[in-house]
């Protein structure tokens, strides 16, 4: 059930195919005093070797509605009003839909807005939780509404983009309101005939000699190729793919701290200074990959069953037969090394399930 291929069993397991199934599962868990864990595509999880002692609820709600009529209720025209003939195309997508298949659909429809997020494993329901982003795009740019089950009162409601509290790799779903909501459907507003996003350096390099603007399909294909070259694409038989993708978030620090790291790098004779990007409010985003690599953890680092991907510094991989405990311990070794080398505390991206204090 996870891309890491580690973790123990669930005591009880149910796959919900519609909203009623979700509500019934929650009621059953509460009636039987079972701890509840909501599972999506399993691409951003490390499950403890002991497994989950309660009920695992896998969200399997499928379906994609589009073409304007799929606008969330708050955006639909009132009776007697005409729909706006131009503008965004709305997609209402079940939380259990495979994310990359949905992206492929939007590209085929000629709608821009998520093409740079091609190749990301997992399901649609997980995208608003972490404000999934890559190659210059984030889902918060196109999410209009998130339909959720509110576990405080077992009512289904729709949250607007603003109510989701999106910021870098975060939302209310994994911070202030963690474990309050279960995502059921997500509505995206995409741009018919829009140009692809070319903010990422590797993409710009890939299309440097391209005549004219690349198509959405060309952009999607290029993103998937770049991801595959970095072991960020699930390819059967590739040992580097037994991972949760990027294990650490790019840290956001004060500008003064970013400058301090740059000075330290020069003093240590590091060939390339840490990449930094403005993050607003006197802050900068640093490259976690640079920090890890220059703390003594290069690509391919490690021996035994857990290590760093040979293709991507931020990916911790299960080389075969690893345990969840070994992955957690190795990740802590990397975090400690970065802290000692650069004075920066890296935050994990995957959800740690069943690990107690480090969850």
Image (cartoon, helix red, strand yellow):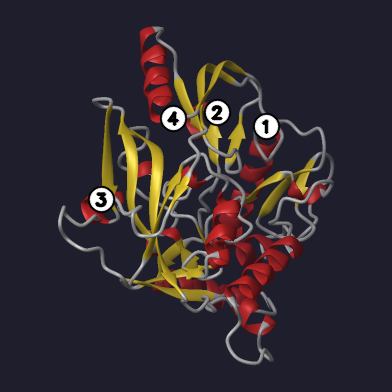
**Callout 4: SS:** loop
Alpha-carbon span between mark 4 and mark 3: 24 Å
Q: Is residue 302 visible?
A: no
**Callout 1: SS:** helix
Alpha-carbon span between mark 1 and mark 2: 9 Å
Q: Which residue is mark 1?
A: 324
Q: Position of residue 285 (x, y in %)?
A: 47, 68
Q: Residues within 10 Å of mark 2 (few under 14, many from 20)?
A: some
Going from N to C along the chain, the mark reached first, 1 or 2, is 1
Left or right: where does residue 153 sit relative to residue 222?
left
Q: Which residue is mark 3?
A: 163
Alpha-carbon span between mark 1 and mark 3: 35 Å
Alpha-carbon span between mark 2 and mark 4: 30 Å
Q: Residue at x 68, y 53 (%)?
A: 315
Left or right: where does residue 211 sit relative to residue 263?
right
Q: Are marks 1 and 2 in contact (CB under 8 Å)?
A: yes
């Amino acid at each position: 059930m996870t891309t890491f291929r580690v973790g123990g069993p669930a005591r009880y397991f149910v796959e919900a195919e519609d909203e009623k199934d979700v509500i019934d599962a929650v009621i059953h868990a509460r009636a039987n005093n079972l701890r509840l864990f909501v599972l999506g595509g399993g691409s951003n999880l490390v499950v403890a070797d002991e497994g989950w002692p309660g009920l695992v609820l896998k969200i399997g709600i499928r379906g994609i509605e589009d073409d304007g009529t799929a606008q969330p209720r708050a955006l639909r025209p009132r009776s007697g009003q005409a729909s706006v003939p131009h503008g965004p195309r709305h997609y209402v997508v079940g939380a259990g839909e495979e994310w990359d298949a949905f992206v492929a659909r939007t590209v085929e429809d000629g709608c821009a807005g998520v093409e740079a997020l091609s190749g990301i494993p997992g399901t649609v329901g997980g995208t608003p939780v972490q404000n999934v982003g890559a190659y210059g795009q984030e889902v918060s740019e196109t999410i209009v509404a998130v339909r959720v089950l509110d576990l405080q009162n077992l009512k289904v409601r729709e949250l607007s983009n603003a109510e989701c509290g999106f910021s870098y790799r975060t939302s209310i779903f994994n911070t202030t309101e963690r474990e309050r909501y279960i995502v059921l459907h997500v509505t995206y507003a995409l741009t018919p005939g829009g140009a692809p996003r070319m903010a990422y350096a590797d993409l710009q390099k890939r299309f440097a000699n391209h005549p004219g603007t690349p198509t959405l399909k060309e952009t999607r294909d290029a993103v998937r190729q770049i991801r595959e070259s970095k072991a960020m694409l699930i390819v059967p038989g590739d040992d580097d793919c037994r991972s949760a993708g990027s294990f650490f978030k790019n840290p956001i620090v004060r500008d003064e701290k970013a400058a301090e790291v740059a000075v330290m790098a020069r003093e240590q004779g590091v060939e390339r200074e840490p990449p930094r990007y403005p993050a607003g409010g006197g802050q900068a985003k640093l490259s976690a990959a640079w920090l890890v690599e220059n703390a003594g953890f290069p690509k391919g680092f490690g021996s035994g069953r857990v290590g760093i991907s040979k293709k991507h510094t931020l990916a911790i991989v299960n080389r075969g037969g690893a345990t969840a405990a070994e992955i957690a311990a190795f990740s802590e070794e990397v975090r400690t090394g970065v802290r000692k080398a650069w004075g920066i505390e890296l935050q994990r991206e995957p959800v740690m399930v069943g690990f107690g204090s480090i969850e």
